[in-house]
Image (cartoon, grey):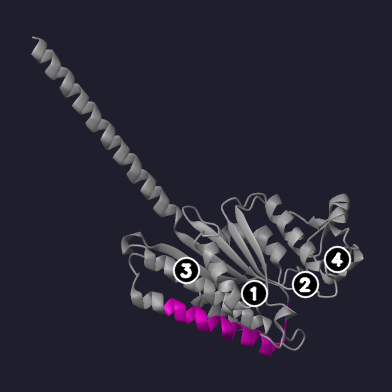
Amino acid sequence: MKLNIKLTIMLLFTVLAFSCKNEEKGEDNNTAKTKDVSENLNISLLLDLSDRISPTKYPNPTMEYYLRDVGFINSVSEAFTEHVRSKKVIRAHDKIQLFFDPTPLNPEINKISKELKIEINKANDSKELIKNIKSIYANYPLKIYNLAIKDGNYIGSDIWRFFKTKINDYCVEKEYRNILVILTDGYIFYKDTQMKEENFTTYLTPESIKSNKLNSSEWNKKIIKQKLGFLKANNDLSNLEIFVLGINPNPKNPYEEDVIKTYWTNWFQSMKVKRFKIRNADLPSNMDKIIKDFISKKD
């Protein structure tokens, strides 16, 4: 009788141990599945095609600003393809695309931008496609900038309105890690989107910085005291990471860079942006690792 009781107890312990092990294994599988979903990349690039890219108005003997943009875009596309290459084909589910706001008047630019909207999935994932993505993103953006410069019709960039009316539909998707890369000099201005509520505005220009007297060491105190900043354009961007590249402050004001970055930082925080980084218009060779680290979450 005692022997039977002992055998029964041992059998129960074995069953319980086996069940617990299976539960743990199930949890690991669920965790892995969730992790895979969260690592589906949805990368959007928003280009500011205002006169900031003009080599005539803003020449730079070291490297023109539009060529720096092209270099930044190339780093983003390389990070994207490296990510896709690291995944198994069955788990491929990633997107990269490019936007402007407003849409350029040149139909050729819009035609090229459609070629830059690419989705990778298990049905089309291949080494040849990945190679094509690198080639497309290395060459097509340069064509866009050259066309915009040749036209000379710099209609500006309505970044604030893009955040207000388009960003959720264009750049944020469920079950993706959503990343928006904005290529801009940091100033925001569009002729048809000029609003002001108290001291919050939809624009920031060298002139507005000067008129608010943010050109002294007291600039931050003035921002806080006068409640200066961008008008909130969105209530919840908690599923979006943003990298702003190309900040190019007016060199006549030594505090301009700090003012620009503070405006953007406060704006992103008010809209609950999940994660963000703001960097100057440095040389692409210096920014390559920083860009790739941001996308791979190594920073």
Q: Whole-Å distance between the Cαs marked 1 and 3?
A: 25 Å
Could you say which disc has been placed on residue 249 in the image?
Answer: 2
| Residue 184 drawn at (x, y percent) | 68, 71
Quarter placement of the N terminus? top left
The residue shown at (44%, 63%) is 94
Q: Whole-Å distance between the Cαs marked 4 and 3?
A: 36 Å
Q: Amino acid at mark 1?
A: Thr
The residue shown at (16%, 23%) is 11
271 above or below 47? Answer: above
76 above or below 107? Answer: above
Q: Quick check: 165 left or right of 56?
A: left
Residue at numbered disc 4 = 209
Q: Amino acid at mark 4?
A: Ile
Mark in front: 4 vs 2: 2
Q: In what element is the residue under mark 4?
A: helix
| Residue 170 drawn at (x, y percent) | 57, 62
Label 3 crowd (10 A; few <14 / some 14-19 / many >=20): many
Quick one: label 4 or label 1, which is nearer the N terminus? 1
Residue at numbered disc 1 = 103
Q: Whole-Å distance between the Cαs marked 3 and 2?
A: 29 Å
Q: Whole-Å distance between the Cαs marked 4 and 1?
A: 28 Å
